[in-house]
Amino acid sequence: MKLRLVLGDQLSHTISSLRDATKEDMILMCEVRQEATYVKHHKKKIVFLFSAMRHFAASLSTKGFNVHYVKYDDPANTGSIRGEVGRLADQRGISEIIVTAANEYRVLEDMKQWANALTLPVAIRPDDRFLCSTEEFAAWAEGRKQFRMEYFYREMRKKHAILMTDDGPIGGQWNYDESNRKSPPKDLTVPDTFHIDIDDITQDVIDLVSQHFSDHFGDIAPFHFAVTRDAALQALDLFVYARLRLFGDYQDAMVQNEPWMFHSHIGLYLNCGLLAPLECIARAEAAYHDGSAPLNAVEGFIRQILGWREYVRGIYWIKMPDYKAMNFLEAKRALPEFYWTADTKMNCMRQCITETKQNAYAHHIQRLMVLGNFALIAGLDPDQVNDWYLLVYADAYEWVELPNVSGMILFADGGIMGSKPYAASGTYINKMSNYCGSCSYKHTVKNGPKACPFNYLYWDFIDRNADKLRGNPRMGFMYQSLDRMTDEKRHEIQVDTDRFFKEIAPHEKS
Ligand SMILES: Cc1cc2nc3c(=O)[nH]c(=O)nc-3n(C[C@H](O)[C@H](O)[C@H](O)COP(=O)(O)OP(=O)(O)OC[C@H]3O[C@@H](n4cnc5c(N)ncnc54)[C@H](O)[C@@H]3O)c2cc1C
Ligand code: SF4
């Protein structure tokens, strides 16, 4: 009998491990302690994944497949994927193990040891749900000094014939980002995100997570994520119908108490396999052709999936395992406690962390320009920042989280992904949000106790990292400004920075 293993982020009926499955084979799915706790994932994320796994297993059983599903609280559960594969192999006289390659370096390395450890043939099949294979990305990257996403994206547009005419990109441009930076008007109405009622399976999982993961970060309620493919397709359709039209215009905008904005909220479904990237792209492209969404919105959305998503995965696999250990700026400050409690006077941080805690979601610009920007300019330790991002978001898996954190926000990779750090002062946050209006600090004040911390931390970051960044051609202007500063101004920046860090880390006080 063949054993086919389906992991929690492999919930696609077309997954390579199941492609030639027969009713005689055994399909194993397991909820294991090791994966749920190696970082203490957000409770809502665990509810989502366990419930989606249970629904997927039920749909396989309905089709007549022989599914062996191990629940988290099964007393015989060994707590690891390898342990469960070995246990079933012993019990059932398995002749071969078939699995799709794990999307995480750590798990894939372990899989490669199974044949020896279990003395059974193990077939590890490629995960072909992505639009660019790891080999294809490696060939694209070969010989390049810099891996710019924009060039990769253009290749992907041509390869998959998306938004293309015979003469080039539809509309004549590859990228419409200059139309995608509108500030939100005061009377902006944001449609509600997708909601689906909790069924018995999800309720059982909620009870289990409440009991076994009470010390994990985040709120379970309200729980309204899709946990089946049908519901995930409905969530996709709702996005295309209600939000896509304005996705581009307000892509970078942040509004107090509006966590969902005009983003799609489908990352969690794509990353666990309930949705496929090409079907999301096709629906958006069709909305452009039928006139229901403009080109700047559709191109912007497609670029995120066809470009960024595939690109970060490619970077992950060509650079691991070294990528995880990179710390180009030698940042070492501990993650402040307020990343867990949201207890900070900085309204932008409080908003984004509170919403993250409630929803296991924050949109891209909150992750990048508020939470990430702070982590960069405050010099937070990349390992701690990576752990935080990996556990708090329902869509977080190392292959996508790590390049976004170490590459995009922290510049820990020294410029593999971005040509310069994405550091910004309070002026940017004020331009793209209405957070500053409800803040104890003033974004217009540069120094002193009332000053926005982003303002002085920004210059402290530039100063602190001068030996690493001064030579960067895209940072020349910043260093010219720093060099023009009076000694008194630089002293004020230092005093404010020291005071701020003392305030947020009381244990550092003497
Ligand atoms: C610091 C940081 C950490 C991040 N961690 C994750 C993560 O763990 N998992 C994750 O899926 N995305 C991550 N992202 C990328 C992006 O923020 C999320 O994909 C997005 O916010 C998910 O929400 P959405 O589905 O509403 O996306 P939308 O804004 O509607 O975008 C549509 C889709 O495009 C893809 N996408 C967009 N931007 C990126 C990107 N930079 N990298 C990869 N895919 C992208 C996602 O699949 C997303 O669902 C991170 C970004 C930053 C800056
Ligand atoms: S003033 Fe500064 S800390 Fe306050 S919300 Fe604005 S950017 Fe954030």
Image (cartoon, rainbow, N blue to C red):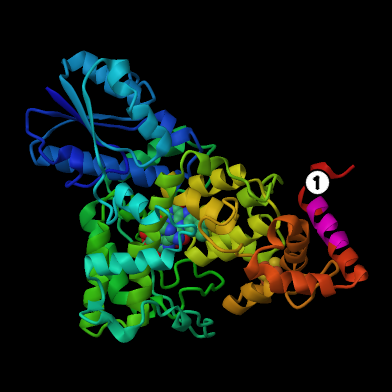
Which residue does the image show at 29% across and 72% down from the upper left? 240
Residue type at numbered disc 1: Pro
Quadrant of res 475: bottom right
Could you tell me if residue 393 is visible in this image?
Answer: no
Question: 356 and 132: which one is in front?
Answer: 132
Quadrant occupied by the N terminus: top left
Question: Where in the figure is residue 451, as x and y percent of width and height?
Answer: 79, 70
Q: Is residue 376 magenta?
A: no
Q: Which of 260 and 329 is in front in this view?
A: 329
Please, what is the dominant secondary structure of the magenta stretch?
helix
Q: Quadrant of residue 110?
A: top left
Residue at (79% x, 53% y) in the render: 501
Q: Is mark 1 within 8 Å of ligand 2?
A: no
Residue at 22% across, 63% down: 279
User: Is 2 on the left-hand or right-hand side of 69?
Assistant: left
**SS type, badge 1:** helix
| Residue positioned 52% across, 81% down in the render | 184
Dividing the picture into quadrants, the one containing residue 377 is bottom right
**Residue 282: image x %, image y %?**
22, 68
Tell whether 143 sits left or right of 123: right
* Residue 120 position within the rendered picture, expressed as x and y whole percent measured from the top left: 22, 18
Pointer 1 local density, CA inside 10 Å: few below 14, some 14–19, many at least 20: few
Q: Compared to 444, does 470 lie above or below?
A: above
Residue 502 appears anywhere in the view:
yes
- Residue sitting nearer the eye, 81 or 231: 81
- Residue tagged 1: 506
**Where is 129 relative to 162, above or below?**
above
- Where's ligand 1: which quadrant? bottom left
Residue 461 rendering spot, x and y as whole percentages: 73, 60
Residue 218 drawn above or below residue 349: above
- Please state the extent of the stretch shown in magenta in the rendering: 494-502
